[in-house]
Amino acid sequence: MVLDTASRVSEEAKAEALEAERSAPEVAEAHEPPPAERGELLTSEQLALLRKLVPTLWLLAAVVTGFVWGVQMVLLVLAAGAITLVIVMMWSSVQSLTGGTPLGFEEALGMGAPSKVEEEKRSVLRALKDLEYERGVGKISPEDYAELLAKYRAEAKRLIQSVDDALGPARAEVERALEQRLNRAGLPAETTAARAENAAETAVEAEAGPAPAEAEKPPETAVSTEATASEDKS
Amino acid sequence: MWQSLPEFGTGVLYAILVAAAYTFAVSLAAGRGRPRLLTAARLGAYATCGLVLFGVLLLAYAFQAHDFRIRYVSHYSDRSMSWVYLLTSLWGGQDGSLLWWSLLLSIYTAACVAWLKGRYRELQPFIIATLMVIIAFFSVLMLFSANPFETNIAGARPDGEGLNPLLQNYWMIIHPPALYTGFVGCSVPFAFCVAALVTGRLDNEWIVATRKWMLFGFMFLSIGNVLGMRWAYEELGWGGYWAWDPVENAACLPWFTAAAYVHSTMIQERRNMLKVWNVFLICFTFFLTIFGTFLTRSGIISSVHSFAQSEIGTYFLYFMGLIAGASAGLIIWRLPMLRAKSEIEAVASREAMFVVNNWALLGAMTFILTATMFPKLSELWHETVTVGPPFFNRWLAPIGITIFALMGLAPLFGWRKTSEGALKQAFKWPGIAFVGAAVLHFAVGSRFGYPAMVPRDPFYPGLVGVILQKVGSLAPVVVVSLAAFNVAVIVQEFQRGVSARRRSAEKRGEPEGVLGALFNLVAKNRRRYGGYIVHLGIVGMFIGFVGSAWNLEREVTLVPGQTHQIGNFDIKYLGTRMCPGNPKCSAEEQADLNKRMLFADFDVKENGKALGQIHPAKFFFAKNPDGPTTEVSLLSSLRQDLYTVIGMIDPQSKRGTFRFHVNPLVMWIWLGGMVLVLGAGISLWPDLAFGELGAWAYVRAGAGVAAGAAFSLWLAMTPSYAYASTKPPAGTPPAVAHADVPLSRSLPPLGATAFGLGVGAVFAARRKRPDGVRHSEPRV
């Protein structure tokens, strides 16, 4: 029953994530109406700034109060801040419960829970890393190392393939939605063929060595570029 | 509004219950296929935590404002107390400590909810729901049985009764919060476990997250227990640090299961085994934290630590029943999914060693639990049996030695199976260290006052008694040899790791120096090498524990001018002074109007060389003149402590009875405790560094601050609060009516706390790598 629920959750999460993506503000920033026209008082950047500024000011007020009026007043200032926080949080919670607030983009992305296979993949990759360490410090015989390495690599390949297979339909769906979105925004949508061509070029560049500008990139970025290229190739 | 503060406070407790219930319901709805509601649940959780904070701030305000209408405030504070002790009074009694517990749980909950953003999506609703149930339980407890805002029946009193003098101690300021932080920290792994069992997502990923939280709890359980030992050592005045008091025992029980879990979880991650065992350990650890609280607060056992007898024990019994029933039901339901996918292939493997280690830790825990409860259980057959410290000490010696040996053995084995050649190579140097230390101890131990064997009386008649007697006699040499073995294993592990790293770097054409390789090795494998540093800390603590085998204790009566010799110390009794009033008293002592202090002054020489002065004392608090407290005076060194206590003194003749203890190697316990915490911190670091999630940064900052504060207090209290000094009190500056602690004494704690805060803040701020890449996946 719970597994059924989990799959339903996953389906709903996907649907909501797609819906959120359709309403994501940063895709067509140029065409986005100002917050006042959307019925909102502040932009998301202003809200983020406020989220940091208000607690800082609150704590600052408590410190100043402490120096001027003593510990009792500090506690009252802190209590006032705490109850304000409670009101804001509870109000937002009820708003969210009744559908009064739109789903945030990051929140929607977070709904895509990693599948069981993805988690197994991570586990096997960790085991491979441990195995390398044990070989390095001489805690495992060469025969055992070879046997375990083969076993874990086979398992990792199988899991990576499963993840790729599972993601295939979703990737196609996302690409389709993205193309539609770009078309609606009046931006030139890159066709699948063109993208494949570009990906192939990137892959060739990666094999030949990074371009001067790319050579300064941190390793993770380069790896992720390579991974994207290979995914696109597939 | 402030005219009705008690009623308002009670209203806040109701609000906490309502908010927790709302969040619980929304979380369950989110978990039943409405993921959109998760946002509402998360916000509800924050609001609930905010309400608990609000309640704590209200109570803290009531203490500072001396609102003696509130029963709890009038019981645990008075107008003479400083604002610091007024703050610590929050957890000085039962009702307030429950609210404090709720606050810590709320902080954990808020941190966990923030950390969960975007991860463990399917588990989240049930994690939040479980944490809300625990918060709701504590709010029910406060509302219906231990309301910290309850008013006095007879109305407001003109003044309060004051905090128990035993609790007006630096260590008591930090010991309870640290221990509670450890106890409460076990709630988060339990919530993860329940969520994994409910959803059926029982793969190995959730266990990775759980391990971090459990390690955090384990670190604070260690800090709390070590601080408690230090408090008992300095404040209770019986000469030791652990009396096997039921409440002390209750505090250490979850430490054993948490330690077992952080080892067995590695087997699950690596070999996909012991799933049932791991979920059992998590549930049982949480159960033990509640059980420990039940023991302390129900009044079913008598202890120096326990709170007054109350009816909250019944609530705890129901809650423990709920935890046990729900955990057992969920585990049985999910048994098919928890079956192991592999099995132990060889005895000579790390997983086999870990399993034995787990059983030894569980054995120690079960023994302590049974012995602690035995007096109560024996009442069932109308015969009260008392279980005292000698019983624990005799039986736990072999169990402790077994655990200590396994701690050294396990790292020498590889996973799955270890070849004979690899084992021989691994055992070579540690084996030599073991034998060498034993031979050296037998050869020269007696010359330094630490003989390899100590005489022990037979505890029981028959074979068991003889075995226990022999083990007790041999314990010093065995522990010292195993300490050498463990240190050799740790050094060897570091050496092998550094060599492997240097070889690998050489192959890559980027050679590394020894120090560089060591730094990089620890930085890249913090969990593993942090664990070894924890082991090093435990070695230090074991050395401290075995020091008790060579303790000396004397009770003597002296008149001023007489000298007594104990060990290599010559102690000359100079006389007494009553402060405030005596011109020899320091300015600080003259200014203290809350108590009268009777000091006995001694000159101390070690091997004929002047070492300094000690001043044990009796304090007579104005609020409690008939119950003077005993203030210990210590002279500490790495080798031994000279520990002195006043028995009684004739005010006319100044003739006094004193107890002198020479406690070898005690300092190693405190040093070992600090190394343990350092190691646990390093183990947590890989998951905290490059933190993609703000919450961990705050947790890290908290850990930094806690470590800094603990270290600062350590500095401030060394040699101790106990008035030991290397300068005589004569010639101290004239009395100045100044109640504050001099700035010079405040500088070390302030400096170290600032250092801790700074380190915490720096790393809390490091939320992104310099390249701006955020890591949300484990780095492989």
Image (spheres, coloured by chain):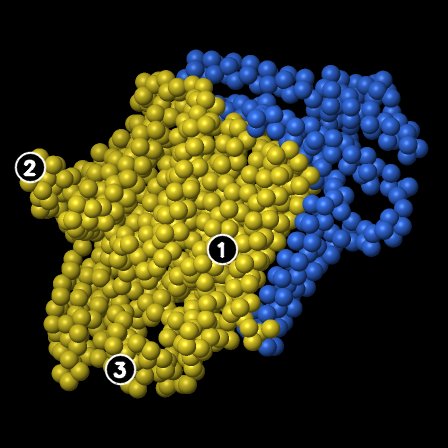
Chain colours: A blue, B yellow
Residue drawn at 33 percent across, 45 percent down: B253
Q: Secondary structure at mark 1?
A: helix
Q: Secondary structure at mark 2?
A: helix
Q: Quadrant of residue B777?
A: top right
Q: Quadrant of the N terminus of chain A?
A: top right
- Residue B699 in the figure: left or right of residue B592: right
Disc 1: which residue: B139
Residue drawn at 47 percent across, 50 percent down: B137
Q: How many marks?
A: 3
Where does the image place residue B720, in percent across and percent down from the top left?
Answer: 33, 65
Q: Which mark is residue B462?
A: 2
Residue drawn at 22 percent across, 36 percent down: B436
Q: Quadrant of the C terminus of chain A?
A: top right
Distance of label 2 from label 1 (alpha carbons): 53 Å
Q: Secondary structure at mark 3?
A: strand
Q: Amino acid at mark 2?
A: Gly
Q: Residue furthest left?
A: B461
Q: Amino acid at mark 1?
A: Ser
Q: Is residue B743 visible?
A: no
